[in-house]
Image (tube, helix red, strand yellow):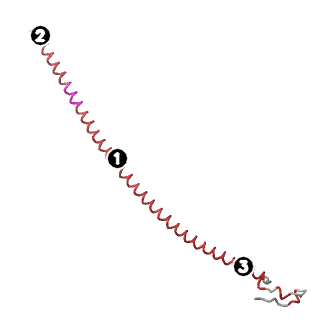
Amino acid sequence: MPEEVRAAKRINSEGERIIEKAQEEAERIVAKAQEQAAFLIDERGLTQQAEAESRRIISEAEADAEEVRRGADEYAVNVLVGLEGDVVKTLQSIKKGIALLDSRRTEVQVDEENGIGPEGYDETADEGVEDEEDAGEPVRR
């Protein structure tokens, strides 16, 4: 029996060694899984933080853009209102100029109809005078 006892002890010790190895491997696998789980949890946390930060940055950029848009719109309105005032003044000046020229044209037409030449020169005063030099000074009105 001693041979059988020795064989049994060998088998028993071999079984214990296999069980120990399996336990070590299981512990190693569990430790690696825990490590990976912790990494993933950290990574997920970092991802969530990065997403929150990106949302904050985008929101801030949109608010800044809206403020710039409002400022640009306000500036454009002010410039356009100023231009409108200038155009109105210019248009009034143009209308006054046209009215002045129309009144001058009317005066000239009336004068021509009455026989008065340019610059108030009375053409009827020279009737019968052959040479302009002998006519003397023109009559002005």
- Tell me whether the residue at label 2 lies in contact with that at label 1, contact meaning CB atoms closer than 8 angstroms: no
Q: Quadrant of the C terminus?
A: bottom right
In magenta segment, residue 31 = no
Compute the Cα span from label 2 to label 3.
Answer: 147 Å
Q: Which residue carries the number 1 mark? A: 51
Nearer the observer, 77 or 124: 124
Q: Which residue carries the number 3 mark? A: 106
Q: Which residue carries the number 2 mark? A: 4
Give the mark, 1 or 3, whose residue is nearer the N terminus.
1
Residue shown at 86%/89% (left/top)?
Answer: 135
Q: Position of residue 47 (x, y in %)?
A: 33, 44
In magenta segment, residue 25 = yes
Compute the Cα span from label 2 to label 1.
Answer: 69 Å
48 w.r.t. 97: above or below: above
Q: Quadrant of the N terminus?
A: top left
Question: Where does the magenta region start and end?
Answer: 22-29
Residue shown at 35%/52% (left/top)?
Answer: 56
Label 2, residues with CA under 10 Å away: few <14, some 14-19, many ≥20: few
